[in-house]
Image: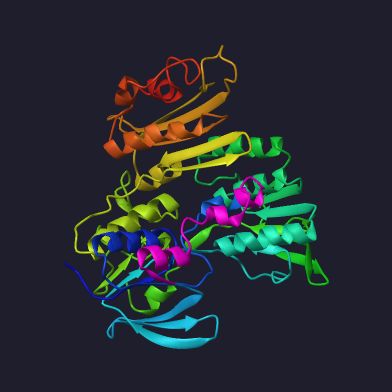
Amino acid sequence: MTTGRLIVIGGDAAGMSAASKVRREQPQREIVVFERSPHTSYSACGMPYFIAGLVESADKLIARSPEKFREKFNIDARIRHEVLEIDVTGQRVRVLNLADSSEAWEAYDQLLITTGAEAIFPQLEGSDAQGIFSLSTLASGIKVFDFMDKELPRSAVVVGGGYIGLEMAEALVRQGLQVSLIEKGEQVMGTLDPDMGILVSEALREIGVALYLNESLTGYEASNGKVTGVVTDQRTIPADLVIVGLGTRPNSKLAQQAGIILGEKGSIRVNPRQQTSAPNIWAAGDCAESFHLVSRKPFHVALGTVANKQGNVAGINLSGGYATFPGVVGTAVSKICKYEVARTGLTERELKTLGLQYTTATTKTKTRAGYYPGAGWITVKLLAEQGTGRLLGGQIVGLEGAAKRIDVLATALTAGMTVQQIVDLDLSYAPPFSPVWDPVQTAARQLV
């Protein structure tokens, strides 16, 4: 049984999942968590819905407070403490107390790095103006909410057409702002194929978002220290509020400086048990590498689902058990007002890079029986390996009831199923829920 002092760097999904698992297995073990923000164990994915007014308070997004971890679980969760350095040889970390600026070295027997991901925020002319935000922590979401409550902005520009950009565009539309979105690519949602990304662009325009594609952010205009406009390589767009949603990168600088090997996209390389290249050091969550079950290659993805699972695996191993994280298929969903977007597996671009031969089928059907009230359209695109028929990826855009069908495809990918096997699945049917042939099976039938 593994014993000794466990230090966890990062107090959100992966870190607290691991710490909680270790505590359940080892009730007396010393566990210390250092978290530089004011919050632990919160739902970052819920921030756009809090800003939209759909969640009544930020407290609703916090699963467990530092006080609860200390009092109920005997986990010493220290907020506003930032780890500045890892001494691998001496098995200690240098910690800055942000409340009083004091520093101290803290020894560990085992160390878990769960430093998450950091928002990409280019330093451009005017980027220090008030009213420009990125979203990465709950504290950053609260700052956006407080700014809107105090300043009452009327126009907003979202920079970036990925998941956070689209969800924030919806949130700001719901709050009555005039919203523009800038995307440097030819489409929003670069994780979709272009023919499916077009559908998402149309959905954005339908809810009133002014969409500027093939434009790059170059800077900001400001007056009296407050943002007044976003400058692209083609125009200036007026704005009282700017959300920079250019994605995230693994927050792996601490590990890199300590000599720990990095992997895909700069994430921390780990083995299936979440062990790093350094002795007695583990990593999990958005800062750590994963494995793609379809491409069979190292992969990085920043999702709360993956972070929680990796954290649980790390916790089992840190407490003396044995567990491995098998990998992911890249499943994700998003919502833009009444429109739902989902994807899993590989895109055409990724398949071409891998040199795989594939076939595709795209179908537009209904989410329910066509005669049943509330039936909406759903477009499903499937990609299968030429010759074998093995499913390689799937994408869905549609109305209510569309997105969660991606879970059928994610399950099929994980099991290595063919499109014929998807056609043969005994899926549920009743007019309020699906046509006789479920939309994913209708698309699969085009490939057999």
Horizontally, is 173 left or right of 317 in the view?
right
Residue 217 seen in this snapshot: no
Percent position (x, y) of residue 280?
Answer: 25, 73
Horizontally, is 379 left or right of 68 in the view?
right
In front of the other: 149 or 375: 149
Quarter of the image where one finds residue 121? bottom right
**Image quarter hosting the C terminus:** top left
Q: Is residue 56 magenta?
A: yes
Which residue is located at x 48 percent, y 77 percent? 81
In front of the other: 175 or 246: 175
Horizontally, is 64 left or right of 171 in the view?
left
Above/below status of 288 relative to 431: below
* Magenta-highlighted residues: 49-77
Percent position (x, y) of residue 159?
Answer: 65, 55
Quarter of the image where one finds residue 7? bottom left
Which residue is located at x 51 percent, y 18 percent? 432
Q: Residue furthest top?
A: 371
Which residue is located at x 53 percent, y 37 percent? 341
Percent position (x, y) of residue 231?
Answer: 74, 61
Above/below status of 10 relative to 336: below
Horizontally, is 318 left or right of 173 in the view?
left
Q: Is residue 416 magenta?
A: no
